Structure formats: C-alpha cells, structure tokens
C-alpha cells in the first residue's frame, strides 16, 4: 500500500523546515501523532521517535527511526510493528507559489493484506492529508514555536 499526498505551503522554506524538524513544537500543531517522544529535540539522522495514532478506537503505538535528513530537501524514516513495516519520505521543494511538501509512505506486512481491513487505506490517506494541513496551518501563521515557546512574528 502506497500513500502519496502533497500540499503547497505559502511560507519560507526555513519556517516550514523548522516547524517540521523541531519535535518540541509538534504538540502545538500536530493533531495526528500523539504522545510523541524522542531521544532528540530535533529530527536528524538516527533520531528515534515513539508516537501513537488512532486509525480505529484504540491507539497504535509506533517506534520510528529517522534514516535520512537532507536539510531543506527531504526526511526519510521507517517504523516497524508486528505485522507492519512503514517507510515514509517527506520531500520539500521551493516553487513560485510556495513550498511543495510531499509525503510518500509505503506500508507492507500482514496488516496491509485483505483489502486493508486492518489498516484502511482511506483512513491512512486522511491522516497524511491532515498532517500536511496541520504543517501548512502552523507554517502560514504568524506564530512560530521554538523549543516549546510560542513567539509572534511579523
């Protein structure tokens, strides 16, 4: 199962990148991934994250390992759970109308079998859309969150 979603964010690359990579501010804007914990405050290669999300009534806890970080270009991470492997890339491209952020996630494993009953593609696509909308909202706002402190700019 592959889920690919993109969004244009009318903001600077620096602000979009900083909002995405500063894990301390995720609780302020990220409505999809809950209980985020990490061994680092900033996403960089080798960072380990844990989080949960709710495709159903119960939360699914995931452990994520950041594999690749190319500043202002891409972040790739992977997650394993019994019956599920996810490989997720985020790509950042400057365009005339703003920053194009693309999320591409590939799921494999037992949970993806049987027409996606255990891991519904529609729900996972909605999660990707909401995550990108959340990033857009915070990045286009006049607020920035740095190390869990809100600051008004402009």
Image (cartoon, grey):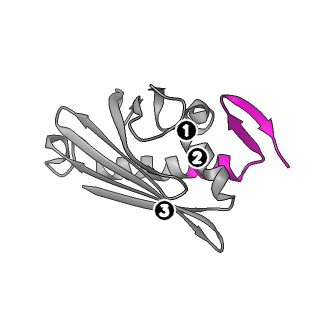
Count neighbours of disc 2 (C-alpha within 10 A) and say few if under 14, some if 14 to 19, many if 20 or more: some
Position of residue 72 measured from the top left corner of the image (x, y, whole percent): 55, 56
Check disc 1 and report the residue beneath it: 30
Q: Secondary structure at mark 2?
A: helix
The reply to whether dot 1 and dot 2 touch (C-beta < 8 Å) is yes
Is residue 137 positioned above or below 8 on the image? above
* Front residue of 17 and 123: 17
Q: CA distance from mark 3 to mark 2?
A: 13 Å
Q: Is residue 14 left or right of residue 20?
A: right
Task: Report the residue that reaches farthest toward the bottom.
Answer: 96
Check disc 3 and report the residue beneath it: 6
Residue shown at 36% from the left, 48% from the top: 124
Residue shown at 48% from the left, 38% from the top: 32
Q: Is residue 110 left or right of residue 29?
A: left
Q: Where on the picture, by quarter, is residue 90? A: bottom left
Q: Earlier in the sequence, mark 1 or mark 3?
A: 3
Residue 139 is one of the magenta-drawn residues: yes
Q: Secondary structure at mark 1?
A: loop
Report the magenta residues as a range. 133-154
Check disc 2 and report the residue beneath it: 134
The reply to whether dot 1 and dot 3 touch (C-beta < 8 Å) is no
Q: Earlier in the sequence, mark 1 or mark 2?
A: 1
Q: In the rendered view of the protein, which quadrant contains the N terminus?
A: bottom left
Residue 50 is one of the magenta-drawn residues: no
Q: CA distance from mark 1 to mark 2?
A: 6 Å
Q: Is residue 116 left or right of residue 100?
A: left
Is residue 134 positioned above or below 8 on the image? above
Q: Earlier in the sequence, mark 3 or mark 2?
A: 3
Task: Report the residue that reaches farthest toward the right.
Answer: 154
Position of residue 148 measured from the top left corner of the image (x, y, whole percent): 66, 28
* Front residue of 40 and 154: 40
């Amino acid at each position: 199962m592959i889920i690919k979603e993109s969004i244009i964010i009318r903001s600077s690359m620096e602000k979009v990148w900083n909002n995405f990579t500063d894990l301390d501010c995720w609780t302020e804007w990220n409505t999809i991934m809950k209980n985020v914990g990490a061994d680092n405050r900033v996403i960089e290669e080798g960072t380990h994250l844990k989080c949960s999300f709710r495709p159903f009534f119960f939360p699914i806890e995931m452990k994520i390992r950041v594999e690749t970080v190319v500043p202002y270009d891409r972040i790739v991470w992977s997650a394993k759970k019994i019956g599920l492997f996810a490989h997720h890339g985020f790509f950042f491209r400057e365009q005339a109308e703003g920053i194009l952020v693309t999320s591409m996630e590939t799921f494999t494993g037992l949970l993806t079998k049987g027409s996606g009953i255990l891991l519904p593609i529609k729900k996972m696509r909605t999660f990707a859309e909401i995550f990108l909308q959340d990033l857009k909202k915070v990045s286009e706002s006049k607020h920035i969150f740095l190390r869990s402190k809100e600051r008004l700019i402009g």
